[in-house]
Every structure is written in C-alpha cells, then in structure tokens.
C-alpha cells in the first residue's frame, strides 16, 4: 500500500510540476515579430480584425478573459486565418479550464503555421494522460 501511495505521489508531482497550466503572460513571448505567421497575420488581416485582436489582447492582459474571448472570436469571424487570435483564445480557454475547446483553438493555430501551439497541446494531452493513469490505479 505504501508503494502505491508513493507511485501516486510521484505521478502527481510530475503532473503539476511539468504539465502545469499555461499562463497568458508567459505566452506573450510567443509573439515574435520575425515569425512568418506574425508577418502574415499583420499583412493579411483586415484593419477591423486587427482592432478586435488588439482589444482582446488588452482585455486578456487585464484579466477580462470572457471579453477577450469574445473579441478574439470577432477577429476570427472577420479573418478566419488569424493564427494568433486562435492561439491566444486557446491559451485563455486553457486558463479557464476549457481544455478541449482551448486545445481545438491551439490545433487550428498550429494548422495555420503557428507550430508552438502544438507544443502546448502536447503538454496538455500528456497531463490528461497521467491524470487518467492516476484515476485507474
């Protein structure tokens, strides 16, 4: 019984230390202006989509997450290939514990060329796997 308890403890340490939730402020470094996706979003997105994106990013930074999601959604409606709008909307959803929807947004950002998004999805999927392993022990 002590062995099982030790195994469960080690798994939980792994889950929370290496697969912790992603914070929006940490992800703002992903906006590398030399990234081809950033350049494409900057050039190709209509001004109105950029306006909603900018407002959404400001709302997210001030922790108005639901309003930020609405504005990112409006930016995506105007310009469906707005990779960074999907990316940051996904990050916010993850922080709001909407993992499936957040991962869907991040996968879409990855499909649009923002490869960093796949790394986050993989991290979430690993955490979910380990959580399921603990449940079944």
Image (cartoon, rainbow, N blue to C red):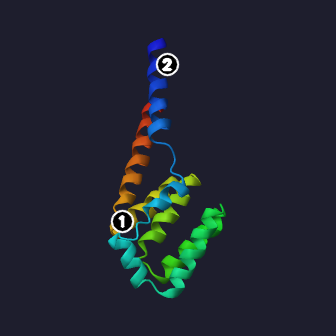
Rendered position, 74 above or below 133: below
Give the number of the disc on residue 5: 2
Along the line of sight, the residue nearer the viewer: 95 or 61:
61
Label 1 neighbourhood size at 10 Å, few (<14), some (14-19), many (20+)?
Answer: many
Where does the image place residue 17, in percent across and percent down from the top left?
A: 48, 36
Label 2 neighbourhood size at 10 Å, few (<14), some (14-19), many (20+)?
Answer: few
Q: In the image, 9: left or right of 35?
A: right
Where does the image place residue 27, in percent across and percent down from the top left?
A: 48, 57
Report the number of discs: 2
Where does the image place residue 112, in percent across and percent down from the top left?
A: 35, 70
* Displayed quadrant of residue 96: bottom right
Rendered position, 120 above or below 3: below
Task: Note whether residue 29 is visible.
Answer: yes
Q: Which residue of the protein is positioned furthest toward the bottom in this rendering? A: 47
- Say if mark 1 contacts mark 2, CB within 8 Å: no
Q: Residue at x 59, y 71 (%)?
A: 56
Give the number of the disc on residue 85: none
Q: Which residue is mark 1?
A: 114
User: Gap in Å between the C-alphas at discs 1 and 2?
Assistant: 40 Å
Q: Mark 1 or mark 2, which has the lower sequence index?
A: 2
């Amino acid at each position: 019984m002590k062995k099982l308890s030790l195994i469960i403890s080690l798994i939980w340490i792994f889950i929370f230390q290496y697969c912790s939730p992603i914070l929006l402020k940490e992800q703002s470094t992903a906006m590398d202006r030399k990234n081809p996706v950033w350049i494409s979003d900057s050039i190709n997105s209509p001004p109105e989509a950029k306006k909603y994106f900018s407002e959404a990013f400001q709302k997210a930074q001030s922790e108005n997450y639901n309003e930020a999601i609405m504005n990112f959604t409006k930016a995506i409606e105007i310009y469906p290939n707005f990779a960074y709008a999907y990316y940051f909307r996904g990050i916010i959803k993850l922080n709001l514990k909407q993992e499936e929807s957040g991962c869907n947004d991040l996968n879409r950002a990855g499909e649009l060329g923002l490869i960093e998004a796949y790394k986050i999805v993989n991290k979430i999927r690993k955490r979910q796997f380990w959580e399921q392993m603990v449940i079944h022990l």
